[in-house]
Each structure stands twice: as C-alpha cells, then as structure tokens.
Amino acid sequence: MNRHQSRLQRDATRPFMLRNLRRTERWARVLGGVVLMVLGLTLPVPFWIEELAETVGLLAAVTGTVGYCPVKHLFARVGEGSTYPTEEEANDGQPR
C-alpha cells in the first residue's frame, strides 16, 4: 500500500461491511446484551432501570451481532488509531 495514500483512500479499499470488533468481543457483547435484557425483564426494580437495562442490552447485542460499534470507531478516530483488527485478530487465528 502506498504510504502517501490518505486515510479515506485506505478505508475505501476495505470491504463494504466494516467490522471493528474482534470475535471474542462480539460474543461477549451478544451474551452480555442478552443477559441484560433478561435481567431488565425479570428483576423487580423501578421502571426506568428496567428500560435502561433493556436498551443497553439491545444495543450491545446488536453491535455484537453486526460486528461494528460506531462509538468505538469514533474514539479510535479521535486517537488516530486503527479500529480495524487484522485478519488474524478478526478470526482469532483461525483461517477462513
């Protein structure tokens, strides 16, 4: 890759569906999100806590399922770090 390419040009060569979460982080988000949603539905707590737990759980489960977290992407852009794992990190060392 040419070192004089802009970040936008480098990002344009990436696959259409961006993923910035590793496989283990994706599973943790899905499982944690499901647990939060179940707890929000079953615990005898005030209504606003139930809604908060269900909303956060749903967001965590969706970002884990899709593999992309826009908040993580924004924070990495501010720090100018790469949010994209390498192919090996994305597959946790397993070949495709």
Image (tube, grey):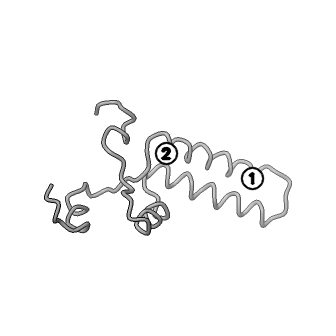
Which image quadrant: the C terminus? Answer: top left
Q: Position of residue 9 (x, y in %)?
A: 20, 66
Query: Which of 14/78 is in front?
Result: 78
Image disc number at residue 26: 2
Q: Residue furthest front?
A: 3
Residue visible at 44% across and 41% down? 23
Quadrant of residue 48 within the rendered picture: bottom right
Query: Which of 50/91 is in front?
Result: 91
| 1 or 2: mark nearer the eye | 2
The residues bearing labels 1 and 2 have C-alpha atoms spaced at a distance of: 23 Å
Q: Position of residue 29 (x, y in %)?
A: 56, 47
Residue visible at 55% across and 51% down? 61
Q: Position of residue 90 (x, y in %)?
A: 37, 42
Q: Earlier in the sequence, mark 1 or mark 2?
A: 2
Amino acid on which the number 1 mark rests in the picture: Leu
Is residue 5 toward the left or the right of residue 23 in the image?
left
Q: Position of residue 84 (x, y in %)?
A: 36, 53
Determine which residue is flagged by label 1.
41
Is residue 2 toward the left or the right of residue 17 in the image?
left
Residue visible at 36% across and 32% down? 93
Local SS, label 1: helix
